[in-house]
Image (cartoon, coloured by chain):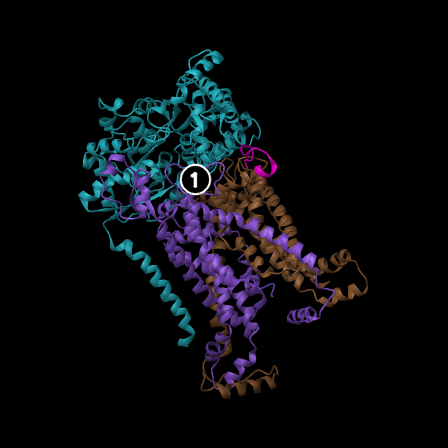
Chain colours: A purple, B brown, C cyan
Amino acid sequence: MSSAKSAATATASSAHSVVEPSPTSKRVAGAIVILYALITLVPLVWIFLTSIKSPPDSISYPPKILFTPSLEGYCNLFTTRTRQTPDYIAALPPPSGVCDAVTRERNMVIAGASNFLPRFANSLIIAFGSTFLAVSLGTLAAYGFSRFKVPLADDLLFFILSTRMMPPIAVAIPIYLMYRQLGLSDTALGMMLLYTAVNVSLAVWLLKGFIDEIPREYEEAAMIDGYTRLQAFFKVVLPQATTGIAATAIFCLIFAWNEYAFASLLTSGSAQTAPPFIPTIIGEGGQDWPAVAAGTTIFLVPILVFTILLRKQLLRGITFGAVRK
Amino acid sequence: MTASHDTFSEKMADAAIRATPEPLAVRVRGLSDRAIAWLFIAPTIVLLLAINIFPLFWAIYLSFTNFRANRPNAVVQNVGLGNYSRILNDPDIWASMQTTAHFVFWTIVLQTLIGFALAYLIDRKFRGHAFWTTLILIPMMLSPAVVGNFWRFLYEPQIGLFAYAVSFVSGIPTSDIQMLGNVHLAPWAIIIVDTWMWTPYVMLICLAGLRSIPDYIYEAAEVDRASPWRQFWSITVPMALPFIMLAVLFRGIENFKMFDMVNLLTGGGPGSTTEVASIALKRDAFEAWATGRSSAFAIVLFVAVFGLANIYVKALNKVKQR
Amino acid sequence: MLKTWRPLLGAAVVCGSLGGALAVPQAAQAEQLTLCWAAWDPANALVELSKDFTAKTKIDMKFEFVPWTSYADRFLNELNSQGKLCDLIIGDSQWVGGSAENGHYVKLNDFFAKEGIKMDDFVPATVVGYSEWPKNTPNYWALPAMGDVVGWTYRKDWFEKPELQKEFKAKYGWDLAAPKTYDQLKQIAEFFQKRQIDGKTVYGASIYTERGSEGITMGVTNVLYDWGFMYENPKKPYEMQGYVNSPDAVKGLEFYKSLYDCCTPPGASNVYMVESADAFKSGQVAMQMNFAFTWPGLYKDEKVGGNRIGFFPNPAEKYHFAQLGGQGISVVSYSDKKGAALQYIKWFAQPDVQAKWWQLGGFSCLKAVVDAPGFKTSQPYAPAFLESMAIVKDFWAEPSYAELLQAMQKRVHDYVIAGKGTAKEALDGLVKDWTEVFKDDGKI
């Protein structure tokens, strides 16, 4: 692979390579790709725009592209409100914040905090907790498979991979019964264990690839130097594998962050994460689209950042290491 | 670590020179390699046994019973193969399989065509291609549930952006563009969203495929005066084929399991026109609470994915060997 | 050795502490109750009402409200998983059979006897519908909390436009007013369909068409009852052939489809309570089928409320019925705070609390409230509500209600919305599905 790459750079540097596309074809290709990229981004831009619209603007026909931005969506996302009579509202002390004022304009008062923050916190705890577990277990197992002759290694590895082929709903049926028996239904611990089990297969596969690339000679040298195998693992292999571990961690995190099927079936309140919660945000009569869009925006931002940071490792992660760049 | 750095790197060089596969005498202190190997692997295996394999066997057992998770007091009876024969003879289940097949087939076709075309264009390496590639990748990283839910809004015939855009281009009144309500359009509504989300994925794998083709092959073809058209069909496509097939495999498995996006977008409707297998399974298992029967359905699905994937991998290996 | 275990120990510690951190806030505050219900206007009214309870008892109330389309899914799942999320639950009327038989709800007979709460004080239809299992026996699993029934609202201001009245009379030969029969309703809907009013295209009627939960069933049964649909042979339980799919029932279903085809707004293929209310609020439709709970909110609406809105009970045809909605409040048997939960029910059953409940927008089931002399005039929708509650009929409340409902959702949606097959085939199929469910249950 790397030899092909260097060959490519070599030819690219020679002035008029036969393989180098002509300027016209480049320009046409660029135009089409940019057009595709712009179209594909429209829904995402629309999510953001909807989040800063007022509810009437969000459902106006034809769809409004120019509008006065409003914080109502974000206010509604974080609060619950009750409708009151104008007299009641007029009697209240002056509004204490932006959201308070916005809400009163709709003849409503803020009744309390919504469930969005706790659900978002659940998402953070479960996603990061399971990622930490999956990567820790995965690193150990990957090292084991990479360095030692494990009996039936191929079968075990295939077994680990195949656990990802089961439809989540099919897995959820027995897990539901098991968790009910163990008292793990609707607990963060239960969800973390489940996501860890799902993610560990990805982690083992990816990390085995990364660890395979670290020359054995490094550890062997360290061991000749008097390190035990364990010390060599912690002091030589782990530092070398940092990039791989980080990339794997982010992929595990993205799965756990985005997961919906298990979360919607196995949690109901205490441990519910944001994906099953966001679609249930409704306003007074009908889905409160600006609030839904606000929740969606807040939920998507971390992943957007990761995508940009991660673009180089993306391929390896999403193909289980089957394709390496 | 830094203190021993010099001697360490010396030893490393030393080891590199003697890069014989001779096993080192490592049992100086600490645990034996064998013990470490098991110590490292066991936790993962134990977790998978507890959360994947044990439940799988439980599901297999349940699939031969009439157990219902919402009737703790009812007597559980063994019904033999009853659940299986009922599932395999149920026209609704076959209809959901057909819906799934339609969905998987068309998403793969569209995503492969568009994804490959995009990869081919990006491989022209126009200025700024890296930047635009990153932008294109964004949809596939997002939560299908959360984004699928928002597409419901985009598809609204009266207020949605999609209907408005289509009507703007085609002149059809927006009230006639009922993507989610019309029996003929709804299956395409879910295909469009899936294609929007996952084309970048196929594109990325195809791009890796295209970049794996060494330039000298093209140069040789140029010397032989092969037309660009011929080069495309006799070099580019065959050499990228293993990659394309891999993308098809991954997308096929994922979409066979499809639940979240479709569940939020159409919930299987209108009628049962978009009721893919996972949604049918969810209804049976978690709404009707026919746990035994739905376990049998789950096993059938699992065997189907597994079997199809294995056959496909064999084909893939054949292509790779060529 | 220790080092090997370090990451695992670390993981275990992190896990444990996270789990602990999540469990603590619930365990630490014993004096907090969680009430589970649907996310809708009455729930907000209940939040308001419950402030008095907290003020009196110092018990904090937490609420878990879920939209109707996922309400049954989520909370039946929660009950079946024996979860402790809800201490109190306002569960749908049809859940009572399953929840009683599977031990999800605490039986309230002893508690009622001890506290002097008499079921005779509540509207009989609501006691049967929300509290009893088996039906018509004195076994109580809930206190009637929210009376509800499917009825209709209409745009009084449009109906009163002289030019429209004249045109209507000329076309149909009778005065444009709230319909008494479904034939009249359809004529009105046809009359308004795609008409221009105040520069906007409007449509005839909004009816239930939702697929995912119970929407279309609640709409269809509402019509089918009037045509003569019956769940079973009144003399022979579970005999459905010729009752569920009687020629009259088939005609009723055909009527529902014709109403959907001719007179609903575009894109109305997945409409339930909120969507229907939305269609009415946004001024899209002349009439709207919906549960009565939406009425207080719509009456208060700035654009369509006040003297622009009128209410009428479900029209008659051969018979005159209306689909029952509404719920009773129950104590979840898996809760650790059953005592406090019962205290809430005791507080809620008091006549003055019930009276305030009605004022705030809840529909009280207490006779003392609904039979009070001023009740009929207390709100403009009170007469339609009372009339409707007198003609209610409910869906199966059997323990296997979810399966029965699912079958009906599918059969009916496939026919009405997707246009698959005929009405006869849909109802024949339904008989087949239901027979299978009852056979599995060992009831036939």
Split into 4 quadrants, where in the image is the N terminus of chain C? bottom left
Res B144 seen here: yes
Res B78 seen here: no
Q: Residues within 10 Å of mark 1 (few under 14, many from 20)?
A: many
Residue B177 in the magenta stretch? The answer is: yes
- Kindly give the residue lying farthest to the right in the view shown: B224
Quarter location, residue B244: bottom right
Q: Which element carries disc 1, helix, strand or loop? A: helix
Horizontal placement of B97 versus A22: left or right?
Answer: left
Q: Is residue A231 above or below residue C322?
A: below
Camera-nearest residue between C14 and A169: C14
Horizontal placement of A85 versus B185: left or right?
Answer: left
What are the residue bounds of the magenta stretch? B167-178
Camera-nearest residue between B78 and B36: B36
Give the percent coordinates (x, y) of residue C384. 33, 23
Give the percent coordinates (x, y) of residue C327. 33, 34
